[in-house]
Image (tube, rainbow, N blue to C red):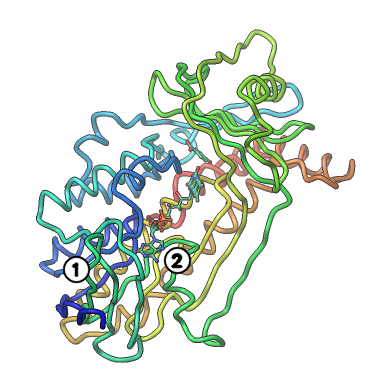
């Protein structure tokens, strides 16, 4: 007979220790709201998971106002634009000149480390390495979060609300009864192969390269570490890509007279699928979805992490009011987020389809892409639209 679970209470149960769950836990604590956060991977895994690299202007402000930007302000690299490369030329899009705003290169791994450190320092309840996470009673005023902690103890936490911050493959979105949620999805006929390389970046700002053999992106993590991506087939196996093949392909796609791509030891590599996905509403009863649990964008627009942070900035205020008896912000939460989500979903789709070489692209497709790329690099209005979206539109609240 299994032992009865330990029964406890909290105000907000949070599933997932990614940027969304961790920032929500911090923002609620700043409002004096207790939460319990459960995560089924280890702290080390969450901190080491290679993902996003670029923070919008508004995300930096959000983290700064939450008292989380100490290291970000010291180590983050402010970028005033990006380069678009196509048809043998490289063109700078100057965000500062076009919008007065910038972005900051500061890896998601560092954001997660800073958030975990802040939560633990504040005595936040973070449970890593849990199993058997379940959510129940979502259409009641006291939903229940169940899990088994790393020491094998069963837990049943009665909450006032639950935040599903458990990513695309989590259990929270599927907990919404069938038929109550609408889903929009687009799979792309390509993926990204990403590497982390122990070599100083060969560029001062990110290079997005359109090439007949496929897209490539030169990003970075620090003055000594580069992050690069190249378009591959969606079913590509990383085992088919030894380091020298990766570098040879990157050299081909970034080749430009008078410019050299420096190579170095590959520290990490992986295949990243590409999809657009939106689910609505982002709420069911006392379950609120945030971040990748509700939406996924292809990383070409550098939006996924920023959307996750923006969702929970809205959710923290909505839950604060809800727990005080005022449900207006909670009732508006989903629509409030979806306006931002759809704008960034469109921008991410637009950047992706403009820059990637689809497997069955015909010459007309390529000419249309090149016409768009030329337009964006010669028209101030077109360049300003890209800059406005890349730096964050609409701005995070
Ligand atoms: P996350 O997926 O980060 O976090 C969800 C957490 O929930 C995870 O830690 C997971 O272990 C946990 N969880 C899941 N199921 C659970 C359960 N049953 N019980 C307990 N915990 C559970 N965005 C960019 O802007 N640029 C990029 O280059 C980029 N690259 C990416 C590469 C990859 C491989 C992936 C998957 C995403 C990438 N993204 C990128 C998007 C990424 O940054 C996400 O937008 C961001 O991680 C979203 O944060 P969260 O919503 O917190 O979800
Ligand atoms: C990254 O640095 O990981 C990165 C930057 C911009 C993108 C995608 C990924 O569009």
Relative to residue 88, is residue 148 drawn left or right?
left
| Residue 108 x %, y % | 38, 43
Q: Residue furthest bottom?
A: 140
- Density class for disc 1 (Cα within 10 Å; few <14, some 14-19, many ≥20) is many
Looking at mark 2, is its residue's CB closer than 8 Å to ligand 1?
yes
Q: Are marks 1 and 2 in contact (CB under 8 Å)?
A: no
| Residue 82 x %, y % | 53, 31
Disc 1 from disc 2: Cα separation:
19 Å
The residue that mark 2 highlights is 170
- Density class for disc 2 (Cα within 10 Å; few <14, some 14-19, many ≥20) is some
Q: Residue furthest top?
A: 258
5 lies above or below 52:
below
Relative to residue 329, is residue 122 drawn left or right?
left
**Label 1 SS:** strand
| Residue 203 x %, y % | 51, 20
Q: Residue at x 74, y 22 (%)?
A: 88
| Residue 41 x %, y % | 35, 54
Looking at mark 1, is its residue's CB closer than 8 Å to ligand 1?
no
Tell me the tag on residue 82. Answer: none
391 lies above or below 97:
below
Tell me the quarter of the image containing the C terminus: bottom left
Tell me the quarter of the image containing the N terminus: bottom left
The residue that mark 1 highlights is 35
Q: Which quadrant would residue 334 be assigned to in this image? A: bottom left
């Amino acid at each position: 007979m299994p032992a009865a679970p330990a029964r406890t209470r909290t105000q907000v149960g949070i599933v997932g220790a990614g940027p969304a769950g961790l920032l929500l836990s911090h923002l609620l604590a700043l409002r004096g709201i207790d939460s319990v956060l459960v995560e089924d991977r280890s702290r080390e895994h969450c901190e080491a998971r290679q993902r996003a690299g670029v923070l919008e202007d508004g995300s930096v402000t959000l983290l700064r106002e939450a008292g989380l930007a100490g290291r970000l302000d010291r180590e983050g690299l402010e970028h005033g634009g990006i380069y678009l490369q196509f048809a043998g030329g490289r063109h700078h899009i100057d965000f500062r000149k076009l919008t007065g705003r910038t972005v900051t290169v500061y890896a998601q791994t560092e954001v997660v480390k800073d958030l975990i450190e802040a939560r633990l320092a504040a005595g936040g309840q973070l449970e890593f390495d849990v199993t058997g996470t379940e959510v129940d009673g979502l259409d009641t005023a006291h939903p229940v979060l169940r899990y088994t902690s790393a020491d094998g103890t069963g837990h049943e936490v009665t909450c006032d609300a639950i935040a599903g911050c458990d990513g695309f493959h989590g259990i929270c979105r599927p907990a919404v009864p069938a038929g109550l949620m609408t889903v929009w999805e687009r799979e792309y006929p390509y993926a990204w192969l990403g590497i982390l390389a122990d070599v100083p970046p060969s560029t001062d700002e990110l290079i997005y390269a359109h090439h007949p053999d496929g897209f490539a992106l030169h990003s970075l993590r620090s003055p000594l570490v580069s992050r690069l991506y190249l378009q591959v087939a969606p079913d590509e196996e990383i085992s088919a890509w030894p380091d020298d093949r990766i570098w040879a392909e990157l050299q081909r796609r970034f080749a430009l007279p008078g410019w050299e791509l420096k190579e170095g030891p590959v520290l990490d590599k992986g295949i990243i699928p590409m999809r657009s996905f939106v689910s609505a509403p982002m709420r069911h009863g006392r379950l609120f979805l945030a971040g990748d649990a509700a939406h996924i964008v292809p990383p070409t627009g550098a939006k996924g992490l920023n959307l996750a942070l923006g969702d929970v900035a809205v959710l923290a205020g909505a839950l604060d009011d809800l727990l005080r008896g005022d449900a207006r912000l909670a009732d508006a939460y989903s629509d409030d987020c979806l306006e931002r989500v759809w704008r960034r979903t469109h921008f991410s789709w637009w950047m992706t389809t403009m820059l990637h070489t689809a497997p069955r692209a015909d010459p007309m497709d390529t000419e249309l892409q090149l016409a768009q790329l030329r337009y964006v690099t010669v028209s101030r209005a077109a360049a300003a639209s890209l800059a406005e979206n890349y730096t964050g539109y609409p701005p995070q609240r």
